[in-house]
Image (cartoon, grey):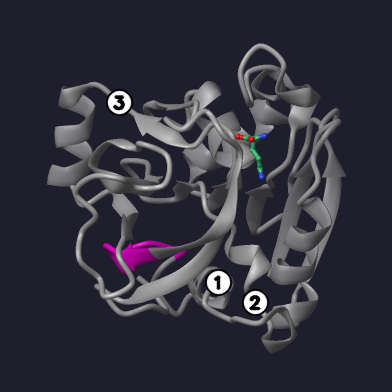
Amino acid sequence: MKTAVIQFPGSNCDMDGVHAAGAVIGQQAVPVWHTETSLEGFDAILVPGGFSYGDHLRSGAIAAHSPVMKEVKRLAEKGVPVIGICNGFQILTEAGLLPGALGRNNSLHFLCHDVHLRVETTHSPFTNQYQKGQIIKIPIAHNEGSYYADSETLNRLEGEGLVAFRYVTPDGHEVLEGNPNGALNNIAGILNEKRNVLGMMPHPERYVEKLLGNTDGLGVFESLLEYVAGGVK
Ligand SMILES: NC(=O)CC[C@H](N)C(=O)O
């Protein structure tokens, strides 16, 4: 599997993404500068976390207009799997690849700590190696992670099983109030309608090796590999 990891001015999780989608799972992952206009030959695309353009205007708003994003859109429409992590999720919503928006955390503080997530669907290129309902621990690190969408969109996401990850308590109970950032329906990650685009606020690439203290994020990259290798229909 060959994954393109897009770099914008201000990305800071790009090399973690290259490591997780590359060496950790024994595959190839290549950093690609945002001015690139062709991603031909890549099996998957990772839009990493960070502070693209210093989060000016809104997180992800400027990066969404980078030349490479036209190509990301084109390939996403062809079915190439695209994962946006944290700032990557914000960029994908700003670019219209995913519905809704990420607003300021309701605490108005930058949050950097572990959260518990429930895997809500295994029917995707990014979650097929987890169990449905599995509780995983993954770190968050963001200012603007409060997922918002209008009620029609939320109902569609819920109805079509497009919520991929939800914030829960460590024992797996749905957090009814007080989730880390105020996200509606405790949404931590969503899929597009075709299920080949995932956006998530927590950082799975930070928990992929024992050395890092936890491997709960590895499933995302192993799922992607399984999907690209044709093991998942
Ligand atoms: N870790 C990140 O990707 C941070 C995303 C964005 N800059 C925010 O603070 O919301």
Q: Is residue 53 above or below residue 168?
A: above
Secondary structure category for the residue under label 3: loop
Q: Earlier in the sequence, mark 3 or mark 1?
A: 3
Secondary structure category for the residue under label 1: loop
In the rendered image, residue 125 lying in the magenta stretch gets the answer: yes
Q: Of 226 and 23, which appears nearest the observer?
A: 23
Numbered-mark total? 3
Residue carrying label 2: 208
- Say whether marks 2 and 1 touch (CB < 8 Å): yes
Determine if residue 41 is in view. Answer: no
Three-letter amino acid code at disc 3? Ala
The answer to which image quadrant residue 87 occupies is top right
Percent across and percent down for residue 223 are: 49, 73
Q: CA distance from mark 3 to mark 2?
A: 30 Å
The answer to which image quadrant residue 38 occupies is top right
Residue carrying label 1: 217
Q: Earlier in the sequence, mark 3 or mark 2?
A: 3
Q: Is residue 88 above or below residue 151?
A: below
Image: magenta residue range: 117-126
Secondary structure category for the residue under label 2: loop
Three-letter amino acid code at disc 2? Val
